[in-house]
């Protein structure tokens, strides 16, 4: 019998949407009878306002970091009802009538709260599962009617247990990434030329980018690729300003670029972290400043999956060059990534959703 699986998410940054897309790909490839849909909840609630909401979020994380972090800390200290709950819950009823889900998968915390609130007030027959897309846990991810939590690491599992979640409701599965990042494709590395990949600059989220790119453009023996995503203006600017660098716009080949790189300079997003783990590419993170990414960066550092630069006065370009030519250190990081990947085992979220034990 086919199941209707509804994946609910938002585009606050692209990590939540990327996780949702990866989940759909995994479920669809392993359960051909499942009807899998992804819904951007903000778009569903208000198509006219969603663009402004997401634009405001981008401004906040780029120019209002202190306020964003203060809001996150407050949400963790005192879990409150989801905003606009009384307005949103009736719309949730419309959403559920439209998709008639057997299983709901949420990759965004406020969505979990909305659905949980609906479940408290209405009869329902679906399973609610939450996929946490960071290494650190904020209380806003927790909701009383959640049947299953999918988490990235054992440390997140322990944190949830400490916060009162039953161990039987938690599965350690990593953070979902698309299949192309998991493919075992051998890469021949050129010992004479090191490859550096820079990502995450589209919203200005890599500190001191201009200074870094200026130094990279004249680094001998280093081939640098910068992925600017959908920011065409940034792509044109960097291409003109740094002709020796390989500047790429939006591409479906991120996994290939990442797999080929000796080192990835990026912000410490949860999705990026697990994409790097699966491709075996060490990470270099510069001055993380968003609260969730600080937690991810600490995990990168503690697990020795890359290097994190915390000091604002560090000579980043010199440090990157030294690390790029440290075969011993890079191989140790790749080895730690392989060990972490192997520790996740072969279990799939699809298996958890399909098991009679889970659905009972």
Image (spheres, rainbow, N blue to C red):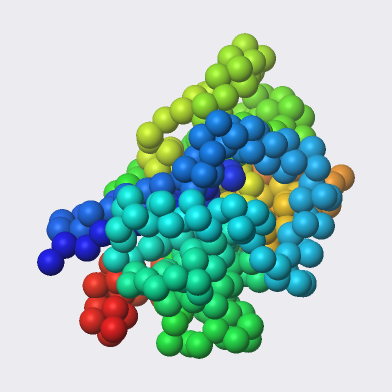
Whether residue 340 is situated above or below residue 24 in the rendered picture: below
Q: Position of residue 166 (x, y in %)?
A: 50, 88
Q: Is residue 311 left or right of residue 42?
A: right
Quarter that holds the N terminus: bottom left
- Which residue is located at x 73 percent, y 65 percent? 75
Position above or below: 233 against 259: above
| Placement of 19 over or under 204, stated as above or below | below
Q: Position of residue 98 (x, y in %)?
A: 33, 50
Name the residue: 40% across, 52% down.
Answer: 95
How many marks do you count on the picture? 0
In this rendering, does residue 94 appear at all?
yes
Nearer to us in this view, 230 or 28: 28
Observer-nearest residue: 83 or 218?
83
Q: Residue at x 40, y 62 (%)?
A: 105
Q: Which quadrant does the C terminus fall into?
A: bottom left
Above or below 307: residue 264: above
Q: Nearer the viewer, residue 215 or 95?
A: 95
Q: Residue furthest right?
A: 313
Q: Nearer the viewer, residue 6 or 117?
A: 117
Residue 49 x %, y %: 59, 34
Say if residue 172 shows up in the picture: no
**Residue shown at 65% from the left, 54% from the top:** 84
Q: In x, y percent, where is residue 103?
A: 33, 66
């Amino acid at each position: 019998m086919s199941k209707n699986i509804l994946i609910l998410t938002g585009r606050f940054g692209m990590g939540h949407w990327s996780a949702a897309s990866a989940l759909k790909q995994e479920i669809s490839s392993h359960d051909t009878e499942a009807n899998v849909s992804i819904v951007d909840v903000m778009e569903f609630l208000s198509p006219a306002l969603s663009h402004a909401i997401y634009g405001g979020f981008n401004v906040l994380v780029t120019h209002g970091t202190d306020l964003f972090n203060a809001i996150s800390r407050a949400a963790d200290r005192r879990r409150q009802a989801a905003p606009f709950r009384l307005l949103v819950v009736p719309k949730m009823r419309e959403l559920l009538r439209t998709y008639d889900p057997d299983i709901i998968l949420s990759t965004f915390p406020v969505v979990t709260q909305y659905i949980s609130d609906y479940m408290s007030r209405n009869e329902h027959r679906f399973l609610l599962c939450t996929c946490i897309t960071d290494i650190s846990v904020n209380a806003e991810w927790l909701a009383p009617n959640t049947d299953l939590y999918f988490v990235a690491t054992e440390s997140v599992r322990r944190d949830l247990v400490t916060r009162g979640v039953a161990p039987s409701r938690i599965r350690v599965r990593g953070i979902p990434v698309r299949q192309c990042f998991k493919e075992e494709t051998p890469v021949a590395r050129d010992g004479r030329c090191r490859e550096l990949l820079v990502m995450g600059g589209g919203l200005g989220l890599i500190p001191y980018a201009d200074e870094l790119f200026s130094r990279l453009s004249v680094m001998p023996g280093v081939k640098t690729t910068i992925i600017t995503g959908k920011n065409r203006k940034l792509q044109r600017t960097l291409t003109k300003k740094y002709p020796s660098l390989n500047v790429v716009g939006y591409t479906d080949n991120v996994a290939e670029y990442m797999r080929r790189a000796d080192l990835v300079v990026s912000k410490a997003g949860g999705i990026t972290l697990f994409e790097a783990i699966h491709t075996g590419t060490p990470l270099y993170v510069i001055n993380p400043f968003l609260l969730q990414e600080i937690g991810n960066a600490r995990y990168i550092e503690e697990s020795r999956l890359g290097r994190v630069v915390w000091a604002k006065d560090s000579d980043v370009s010199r440090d990157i060059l030294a690390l790029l030519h440290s075969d011993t250190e890079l191989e140790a990081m790749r080895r730690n990534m392989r060990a972490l990947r192997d520790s996740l085992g072969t279990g799939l979220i699809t298996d958890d959703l399909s098991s009679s034990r889970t659905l009972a």
